[in-house]
Structures are given as structure tokens and as C-alpha cells.
Amino acid sequence: MAPRVGVVTFPGSLDDRDAQRAVRLAGGEPVALWHGSHSLEGVDALVLPGGFSYGDYLRCGAIASLSPIMAEVIEAANKGMPVLGICNGFQMLAEAHLLEGGLIRNSHGQFICRDQVLRVENASTDWTSDFEQGQQITIPLKNGEGGFMADAATIERLEGEGRVVFRYVEVDPNGSLNAIAGISNERGNVVGLMPHPEHAVEEGFGPDTSAAMRNGTDGLGLFTSAISRVLQAA
């Protein structure tokens, strides 16, 4: 039986269907979950998708982090369930204190949308085991408040413990400290990143020009990694 991966929809989620498709292409069974529910429907892993939950009022992800289902997400994450937060989902994980640091407005003050090169800094998390350490991948990035910030002691701890999972290469597109694009918790089952792997899971999507986005399949490895971990633990 294929692992069941829940994808939570919040008011304002935009990429929940894309995440479900990514799960399916990776060999899992996507399960649609609603933010107002208190049930995870027996899923084996979770994805908090990108978008503009609650219109990004207050702070990005702040209101969504208090949604009813987040109590179940936090409990499951603390018990070791693989949880991935993508863009707005990363912001939710930070607001829920499942991940350290926070995301602030891009340093240049503008929304950015581009293909972004990342380096995989940690290939041992539940969401990166199908990558190689130091591997470079290209996936889309689209955010207005993606600058990763934390105090100096937290940055030192994240770097020292190998919990920086992805790092921007060639350019730091949003002013993130140490060009950090994604991090994990200590256990490695919870990962958040600003770029969108669910938009790079199938060949042939995106304009085929040198000037426009050229999405490939570099994002698929996050989803296959989690599914493999679930199967190994079964």
C-alpha cells in the first residue's frame, strides 16, 4: 500500500493541488486535509503547502499556525512524522515553533519569481535522503517575504548541527542570512524551505526558452525521500 501523505489546505492556499500531484508522482497517496479539522486521517507524512494563508495578514503563516489542525500537526511532528513546509508552509512551521528563526520581507522589497539553484547541504533528513550531499538542484522560487532571519546564536547552532538543509547558490534572492533556503529540526523529520519543489516534479512544464522558467524534476526527490522513509519505517 502506498504511503498516505496529507496536504493541508488553508484559506488562501495556492499550491495544495500541486503538492498533491507531486505526492502522487512520487508514488504516494495524497490525502486532502482541511485546516479546520482535528483529524490527520491516519496519514504517514504531512505537507504544508505554499500560498497566502489568511491573506498573509498579521505575519505570513501566523494565523494559519493557530488553525485547529496545527495542534495535530505539532503533535505528529514531535512524535517523528515527516512534515514538510513549503514557502508559506515554512512560515507556518516557524510561527508554530517547529522550526527556529523566522521569515521577513525580501531585502529588496519586491516579490520575486525565478528558477533558483540550491545546494543540498544535508542529505540525511526525511525529505532529502534521495539527494547527494552537495548536489545542486534547480526549482522555482516565488515569495515576497522569504528572508530567513534568526539571532546569531541560532544561526551558529543551525550551521554547527548541520540543520541548514538547502542553501541558495549564485544569488541570495531575498536577503536570507547565510543564504539559507531551508532548515530542519534536530530530528530531521521536519523540513521547511522557501522554494517550491512541487513545481518541479514532471518534465515538460514551463516555457522552453532561455529567458523563462525551465522546470524539470529536481523537486521530486523531496517527496520520494519521505515516501522511502515511511516505507522503511513500516
Image (spheres, rainbow, N blue to C red):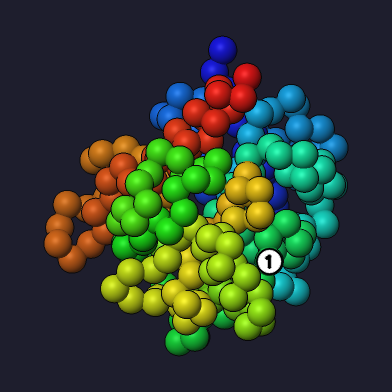
Give the residue displayed 40% in from the left and 56% down from the top. Answer: 120
Horizontal side of residue 153 vs 215, given as left or right: right
Q: Is residue 208 visible?
A: yes
Q: Is residue 205 visible?
A: no
Q: Residue at label 1?
A: 100
Q: Nearer the viewer, residue 182 or 141?
A: 182
Q: Quadrant of the N terminus?
A: top right
In the displayed structure, 143 sits above or below 24; it is below
Q: Nearer the viewer, residue 29 or 179?
A: 179
The residue furthest bottom is: 108
Residue 202 spot, x, y in % from top left: 32, 38
Horizontal side of residue 66 vs 106, given as left or right: right
In the displayed structure, 64 sits above or below 77; it is below
Horizontal side of residue 1 vs 60, given as left or right: left
Give the residue displayed 46% in from the left and 54% down from the top. Answer: 122
Give the residue displayed 49% in from the left and 45% down from the top. Answer: 124
In the displayed structure, 170 sits above or below 84; it is below
Residue 96 spot, x, y in % from top left: 77, 59
Residue 114 spot, x, y in % from top left: 34, 66
Horizontal side of residue 207 vs 85, given as left or right: left
Q: How many marks?
A: 1
